[in-house]
């Protein structure tokens, strides 16, 4: 994903399990960690585009993992990727009160289903 919204912020016919990326972004007063679990994005596109955010002025680390780690305070399930037929689950870590704006963003912008942990 070229942009990780909103904080710095996820085979077409079957689910692509076992593929996720943890994105950790840091700036002066910002420390954000999300994990994108692939659902239907072609693997090469997931790795080369969706998991390579371009976040100006932020230090970004990306780690590819088999599945998102435990400990997320919320997950946007089946998040639609704008302008594409693809879906992913976006796991959010850190400050649980961020759910106040992440939940509406998930449901309206990503047309996903918010699940609090």
Image (spheres, helix red, strand yellow):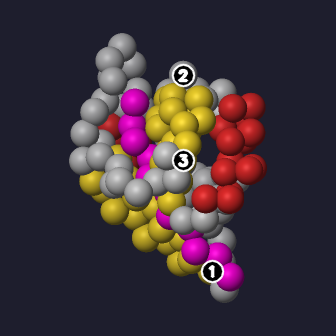
Q: Which residue is mark 3?
A: 74
Q: Quadrant of residue 106?
A: top right
* Residue underneath mark 1: 27
Element type at mark 1: strand
**Mark 2, mark 3: which one is toward the viewer?**
3
Q: Nearer the viewer, mark 2 or mark 1?
A: 1
Q: Earlier in the sequence, mark 2 or mark 3?
A: 3
**Closer to the camera, 9 or 114?**
114
Q: CA distance from mark 2 to mark 1?
A: 32 Å
Q: Is residue 21 left or right of residue 114?
A: left
Residue annotated with mark 2: 85
Is tag 2's residue or tag 1's residue first in the polypeptide sequence? 1
Q: Is residue 34 magenta?
A: yes
Tag 2's secondary structure? loop
Residue at 74% from the left image edge and 31% from the top image edge:
108
Name which residue lies at 35% across and 54% down.
70
Please provide the residue range marked out in magenta. Answer: 29-39
Position in image of residue 88 (x %, y %)? 47, 35
Residue lying at the far front of the rendered structure = 117
Q: Residue at the spot x=24%, y=47% of the render?
A: 66
Residue 53 image point, x, y percent: 54, 58
Q: Which mark is residue 109?
A: none
Mark-to-mark CA distance, 1 and 3: 22 Å
């Amino acid at each position: 994903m070229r942009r990780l919204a909103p904080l710095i912020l996820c085979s077409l016919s079957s689910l692509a399990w076992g593929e996720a990326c943890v994105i950790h972004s840091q700036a002066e007063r910002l420390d954000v960690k999300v994990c994108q679990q692939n659902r239907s994005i072609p693997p090469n596109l997931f790795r080369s585009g969706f998991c390579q955010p371009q976040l100006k002025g932020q230090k970004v680390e990306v780690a590819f993992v088999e599945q998102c780690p435990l400990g997320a305070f919320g997950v946007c399930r089946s998040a639609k990727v704008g302008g594409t037929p693809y879906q992913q689950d976006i796991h959010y870590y850190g400050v649980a009160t961020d759910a106040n704006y992440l939940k509406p963003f998930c449901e309206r912008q990503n047309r996903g289903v918010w699940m609090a942990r």
